[in-house]
Amino acid sequence: MSAHAYIQYANVPDSLIASSRQRVDDNGSVKLISFDGCPLVGQIDVLSDKRIQIELPWPRALELRHALGDWLVYHGIPYTVVP
């Protein structure tokens, strides 16, 4: 996957945050988050201005890419895809 979708943590509905699961990767350097019904796991990044951003891989596989996009739209989460 060469592109990524970015969402702002503040734009995630409270119900999804409450049911999310967070963990640190095996190397202990990256904090990961998974949401109910979301087909992929995201990486949590704290930006320099104290905003929290979640980076999700943007799949090349059309079916998986549509599943992720549909999930984001269904929950009203604005996102940006960057190649």
Image (cartoon, rainbow, N blue to C red):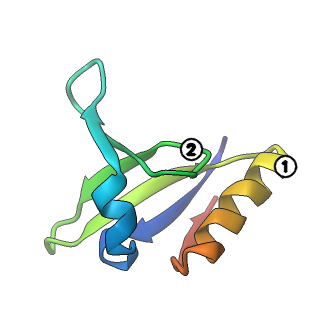
Q: Amino acid at mark 2?
A: Leu
Secondary element under disc 1, as helix, strand or loop, is helix
The residues bearing labels 2 and 1 have C-alpha atoms spaced at a distance of 13 Å
Instruction: For the C terminus, give its image quadrant.
Output: bottom right
The picture places residue 6, in percent across and down from the top left corner, at 48, 65
Horizontal side of residue 27 vs 63, given as left or right: left
2 or 1: tag closer to the N-terminus: 2
| Farthest right residue in view | 62
Figure check: 78 above or below 9:
below
Find residue 22 and report its horizontal and vertical position in percent.
28, 42
Say whether residue 30 is visible. Answer: no
So how many labels did they put on this image? 2
Residue 60 place in picture, x, y as percent: 78, 45
What is the secondary structure assignment of the residue under circle 2?
loop
Residue 23 image position (x, y, % from top left): 26, 34
Where's the N terminus, which quadrant?
top right
- For the point 71% across and 67% down, which residue is it? 70
Circle 2 sits on which residue? 40
Can you tell which mark lies on residue 38?
none
Work out whether 80 lies above or below 6: below
Dot 1 surroundings within 10 Å: few (below 14), some, or many (20 or more)? Answer: few
Residue 65 occupies which quadrant of the picture? bottom right
Three-letter code, disc 1: Glu
Q: Left of 33 or right of it: where is 1?
A: right
Direction from residue 79 to residue 64 in the image, left or right: right
Front-lying residue, 16 or 49: 16
Q: 65 or 15: nearer the eye? A: 15
Disc 2, disc 1: CB below 8 Å? no
Mark 1 highlights which residue?
Answer: 63
Residue 69: tell me if it is visible: yes
At horizontal 63% and vertical 74% (from top left) the residue drawn is: 74
